Amino acid sequence: MTVGPPGLRVESVDVLVVGAGPAGSTAAEHLARAGHRVLVVEEHPKVGEPVQCAGLVSKRVLALAGSDSFVRTSVRGASVFGPSLRSISFRASEPRGYVIDRAALDVFLAEKAARAGAEIRTSTRFDRVVATSSSGVTVRLSGAPGGRSDVQARLVVGADGVASAVARAFRLRRPVEILPAFEAEFPRSPGDPDSVEVYLGRTIAPGLFGWWIPDGAGGARVGVAADADGTSARTYCGRLVERLARRFGRALGSPTAYIVSGIPIGALPATSGDRVLLVGDAAAQVKPLSGGGIFTGMRCAEIAGKVAHESLARDDLSRSALSAYDHAWRAELGEELRRALYLRRIFTRLNDAELDAVVEALRGAASEATIVAFGDIDFPTHVVRELLGRSPSLVRLLPKALGAWFSSGTYRIPEVEPGPLRK
Ligand SMILES: Cc1cc2nc3c(=O)[nH]c(=O)nc-3n(C[C@H](O)[C@H](O)[C@H](O)COP(=O)(O)OP(=O)(O)OC[C@H]3O[C@@H](n4cnc5c(N)ncnc54)[C@H](O)[C@@H]3O)c2cc1C
């Protein structure tokens, strides 16, 4: 510990991780295990709270966490409803998704990071960068217990979610867009407990979709992520709840919890800089077709941990050394996210009649078999490509560029413009 300006403590660490969500704790665990001094700061008093997630994940998340202790139930099926409520359904013979207790996942991962040697400091907020020098970055923290304090870190990992203060402090770009999302949790709900439901349509959720997810205890998580067009995501969610009540033939009752947050779409063009890496939602490492970011965030955090360890060992934390992280995670996930972003652009331009026509084109045993065979919630563009290849009526509904994509292995989907610079 060194002494900074009068009355201010300055401690030194190798890595300051900002945010104890799944991405931050995963990066912290890997770096602490490699022998680095890691401090994780979390602005909330309790890790995992408030929950801002529907908690539907693939098996890969359980594998990355090394546990299934936080799983509440699994689902094998899904139904997709068009705007007119015509639907397609499919069911696999084995679980395809896991509904988790999201707070329990966050606590599990933070405890794992702590066991590896990281210090987790709650009620502590990253405020800003106060100085940079040849030995590190000095960062101002605020909050209990010690009021303000400064930390000097050789490397800062920004895992502070969609509104990342770290990304802002290091002047990294914003995501292409941020979709407002709203979810209500109902302790009792009719519906198939082995299946999730997805609702499409401009009046329900323009820009993404609405969801009904069984919670494993007889209730359900009902939410929407929708473009901000002057109507709030909460209003859209209310419409979905009314629609569900009509479909189920009875009201869902009163919700016991609400979630309001934003989903970043369109990964940042650079997720590293001098002495900084961004992981998870802070880097917008989120699947553009579903808004899911737990798998992508945790996997990228693992990659960040490896690259950061090598850079710390060489004592080269320059932008060019850390750009190895950008290259590594994009080599694994970049093409999927890019394709999904492009497909999302096409999808969001479809009107309700066209969305109904897409659902109609997907009806039938052949499409259902293709979806069951190729459906993967982490890599959804694979099944889209298969469906386009097998369904001429679907291709006719969509732009010509997509035809080029599925008929040629080398066709490169156009880039979507990056998000704006941060002020
Ligand atoms: C309504 C909704 C439903 C979703 N459903 C799913 C789903 O079903 N499946 C899925 O995979 N994904 C889902 N997501 C996305 C998923 O929640 C995120 O992708 C995931 O939480 C990202 O993890 P993270 O660790 O990057 O960030 P977060 O989980 O957001 O964690 C960031 C942490 O940083 C802390 N923090 C922020 N600023 C500071 C600061 N200045 N100083 C200190 N701490 C700070 C926050 O308190 C928070 O704990 C959903 C998102 C929403 C909004």
Image (cartoon, grey):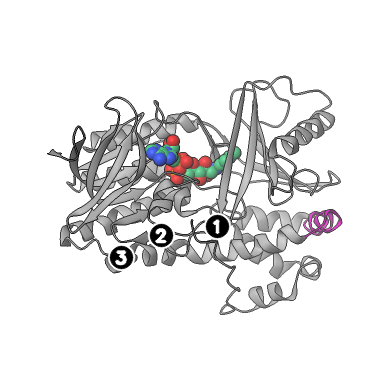
Residue 126, x across and y down, in percent:
35, 40
- Left or right: residue 253 compared with residue 177: right
**Residue found 17% across the figure and 46% down from its top:** 35
Q: Secondary structure at mark 2?
A: loop
Using the numbered discs, state the Cα–Cα distance from disc 3 to disc 2 in whole angstroms. Answer: 10 Å
Give the mark nearer the N terminus: 3 vs 2: 2
- Residue stretch in magenta: 350-362
Q: Is residue 45 visible?
A: yes
Q: Which residue is mark 1?
A: 379
Of helix, strand and loop, which one carries label 1?
loop
Does the residue at mark 1 contact the one at mark 3 (Cβ under 8 Å)?
A: no
The tag earlier along the polypeptide, 1 or 3, is 3
Q: Nearer the viewer, residue 380 or 45?
A: 45
Q: On screen, 63 above or below 412?
A: above
Is any part of residue 20 visible from this angle? no
* Residue 259 at x, y percent in the picture: 59, 32
The N terminus - image quarter: top left
Residue 106 at x, y percent in the picture: 41, 34
Instruction: Look at label 3 and name its amino acid.
Output: Arg
What amino acid is at disc 1? Phe
> Relative to 265, does residue 162 appear above or below in the rendering?
above
Query: Which residue corresponds to mark 3?
Result: 319
Tag 3 and tag 2, C-beta contact below 8 Å: no
Q: Is residue 294 left or right of residue 377?
A: left
